[in-house]
Amino acid sequence: MKNQKLSKIFYSRAFEKIGLIPRSIIRTLNRFLKQLFEQTTDTAPNFVLYEFRISRYQTIASIKCFINLICFPYLFHFLVQQTIIYPIFEYEWNQTDVLMTINQVEQEKIFIQFQNFDEQWFFQDLLNYHHQYSTDQNSMNQTLMSLKSERHPYYSSYLAKLAEKRNTDWITLISTILSDCLTFFIFLKLLFLSTPQLIILKSFLIESIYSLNDTTKSFFLILGTDLLVGFHSSKGWELFMENCLAHFGFASDKDFIFLFVSTFPVILDTIFKYWIFRYLNKISPSTVATYQNMLE
């Protein structure tokens, strides 16, 4: 009898009755109702409202920090270059006679522009004076020589326009580089002053990323890798390098661009794969497994 009673007591303690609704759902519902309908006092605050306010503050602070770090440097760069630096350099450049040497790249560029101008002007003369031509070869050669001699006075004016454009390009280049340096220091100052906001922004981004499911995370991983180091990303890197070289006043060197395109995406792809193997595999193994399955 004693053994039967002990077995019943042990059985009732070890195996609880399973209800229709899981106990975790009941506990979560009770906690939610308690937080929702509990009156706010000094000792029992409304945690739902408190968490909502914290989440709203985190979102607003993250958006403000992101806008300040992205929009303010661009606005500062535009205003400083257009209102301060460019007018000062333009005035000083026009007041003083600056002797500038022309390198080989600029000579080729000016020669191509001048050659295109000459060919367009000659073609327009042919269209305007086509009635002067005849079947005689001598008369045709004389007409061509006369048309060419008539264009000589316009060469000097066009060369003056090219020189003026070259001076404008140099002023723009110098003002752009100086504005970039000032904007870079302002950006570093913003990073130093916005340290608390950056911490909030980092936590907001991490929370937003972790809230995504594994399929969505893998989708963004594949999209980012294909855009940066994918098969068709080489054209984008070529355009990026050409714009960067033109922005800082360097000539578009095809050999340097091809060397960059053939090496930098490979290095970036290696770093990305190492990051997946070293960090992401520890943080979220399910995301790595889903990512590999989607690639296959």
Image (tube, grey):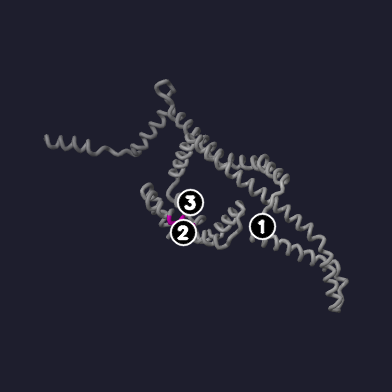
Q: Give SS at disc 2.
A: helix
Would you name the residue on which mark 2 appears? 266
- Which of the two labelled residues, at mark 3 and mark 1, occupies the earlier sequence position? 1
Q: In the rendered view, does 31 fall on the left or right side of 18? A: right
- Rounded to the nearest angstrom, the CA distance separating label 3 from label 1 is 48 Å
- Residue at 78%, 61% in the rendered image: 155
Q: Residue furthest bottom?
A: 136
- Residue at 85%, 69% in the rendered image: 146
- Rounded to the nearest angstrom, the CA distance separating label 1 from label 2 is 37 Å
The amino acid pointed to by label 2 is Val
- Rounded to the nearest angstrom, the CA distance separating label 3 from label 2 is 20 Å
- Which of the two labelled residues, at mark 1 and mark 2, occupies the earlier sequence position? 1
Would you name the residue on which mark 1 appears? 102
The amino acid pointed to by label 1 is Ile
Binning the other alpha carbons within 10 Å of mark 1 as few (below 14), some (14 to 19) or many (20 upward) gives few
- The quadrant of the picture occupied by the N terminus is top left
Query: Image quarter for residue 24?
Result: top left
**CB atoms at circles 3 and 1 under 8 Å apart?**
no
